[in-house]
Image (spheres, rainbow, N blue to C red):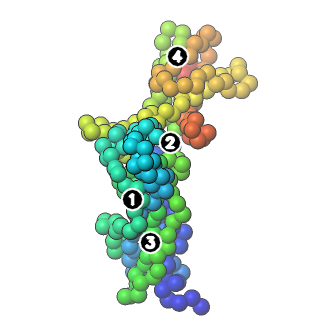
């Protein structure tokens, strides 16, 4: 049999990320059959890449933006320019300290989306504390799941105008406005099909939010779907809800 504190340890501790909303989730340990356990959450960042960049800054007297120009994007956008090069100490998540839920929102603590993070959870029951259970390394940019674009269609003068909107990030810019995911050079893909087509046809791939599709057949129903594509990761979102119109 396992020692009491081992059987209390949380199981399957992992990050779940959607549109960069980063939630730490877990399941109760084998000994936590009731609802009397409480949980404690910590997190930390550890970035060997930025440590290497810092060494280059000091050696060659240049700034990190000259080494990796893209790294300023999210920092400038969310107004949280940071100089962290790895944290050795775990930090308590105060709002998830002594909770009964099986999840903890760490979105604000993991907002530098190219950096790797770790989370860990421990349990307390009847005065007995478990050891910590730690996640695998979590890099939001690599692991978040992106929702499909929101899409609207109107029929204007023999064309379908498709309006596309990427999901918003959970951050605000320095003016307090929501930051769109379009900032990260996402690509829209638009597909169309009708009764006369045996298969769907891709009619657009690019960054424009308004796409015009010429249609020539009258009294014909057309259906359009769209998805988002991340070229850097060769990864795509699920498809949007199908939108259909009929030409006059």
State which mark lies toward you, 3 or 1: 3
Q: CA distance from mark 1 to mark 4?
A: 40 Å
Residue, x 64% and y 25% (percent of image)?
202
For this rendering, which residue is in front, 45 or 187? 45
* Quadrant in which the N terminus appears: bottom right
Residue, x 46% and y 76% (percent of image)?
132
**Residue 181 seen anywhere in this rendered image of the structure:** no
Q: CA distance from mark 2 to mark 4?
A: 23 Å
Q: CA distance from mark 4 to mark 3?
A: 50 Å
Crowdedness of circle 1 by 10 Å Cα count: few (<14), some, many (20+)?
Answer: some
In the rendered view, tell whether residue 245 sits above or below residue 128: above
In this figure, which residue is indicated by the disc labeled 3? 121
Residue farthest along the right direction in this orientation? 198
In this figure, which residue is indicated by the disc labeled 4? 212
| For the residues bearing labels 2 and 4, Cβ distance under 8 angstroms | no
To which quarter of the image does residue 66 belong? top left
Q: Earlier in the sequence, mark 2 or mark 4?
A: 2
Q: CA distance from mark 3 to mark 1?
A: 13 Å
Where's residue 68, x and y in %? 47, 40
Q: CA distance from mark 2 to mark 1?
A: 19 Å
Residue, x 53% and y 90% (percent of image)?
3
Where's residue 81, x and y in %? 33, 46
In this figure, which residue is indicated by the disc labeled 2? 147
Q: Earlier in the sequence, mark 3 or mark 1?
A: 1
Q: Earlier in the sequence, mark 4 or mark 3?
A: 3
In this figure, which residue is indicated by the disc labeled 1? 105
**Residue 51 seen anywhere in this rendered image of the structure:** yes
To which quarter of the image does residue 96 belong? bottom left
Residue, x 43% and y 48% (percent of image)?
59
In the rendered view, tell whether residue 215 sits above or below residue 74: above
State which mark lies toward you, 4 or 3: 3
| For the residues bearing labels 1 and 4, Cβ distance under 8 angstroms | no
């Amino acid at each position: 049999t396992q020692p009491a504190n081992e059987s209390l340890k949380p199981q399957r501790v992992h990050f779940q990320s959607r549109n960069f909303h980063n939630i730490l989730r877990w399941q109760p340990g084998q000994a936590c059959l009731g609802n009397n356990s409480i949980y404690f959450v910590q997190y930390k960042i550890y970035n060997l890449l930025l440590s290497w960049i810092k060494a280059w800054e000091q050696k060659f007297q240049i700034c990190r933006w000259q080494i990796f120009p893209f790294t300023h994007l999210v920092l400038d956008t969310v107004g949280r320019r940071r100089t962290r090069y790895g944290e050795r100490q775990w930090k308590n998540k105060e709002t998830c300290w002594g909770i009964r839920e099986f999840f903890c929102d760490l979105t604000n603590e993991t907002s530098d989306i190219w950096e790797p993070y770790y989370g860990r959870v421990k349990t307390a029951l009847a005065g007995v504390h478990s050891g910590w259970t730690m996640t695998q390394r979590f890099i939001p940019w690599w692991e978040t799941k992106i929702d499909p674009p929101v899409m609207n269609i109107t029929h204007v003068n023999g064309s379908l105008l498709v309006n596309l909107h990427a999901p918003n990030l959970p951050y605000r810019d320095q003016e307090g406005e929501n930051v769109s995911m379009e900032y990260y050079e996402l690509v829209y893909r638009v597909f169309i099909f009708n009764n006369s087509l045996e298969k769907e046809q891709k009619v657009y791939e690019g960054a424009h939010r308004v796409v015009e599709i010429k249609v020539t057949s009258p009294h014909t129903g057309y259906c359009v779907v769209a998805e988002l594509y991340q070229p850097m990761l060769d990864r795509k979102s699920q498809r949007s809800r199908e939108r259909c119109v009929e030409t006059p």
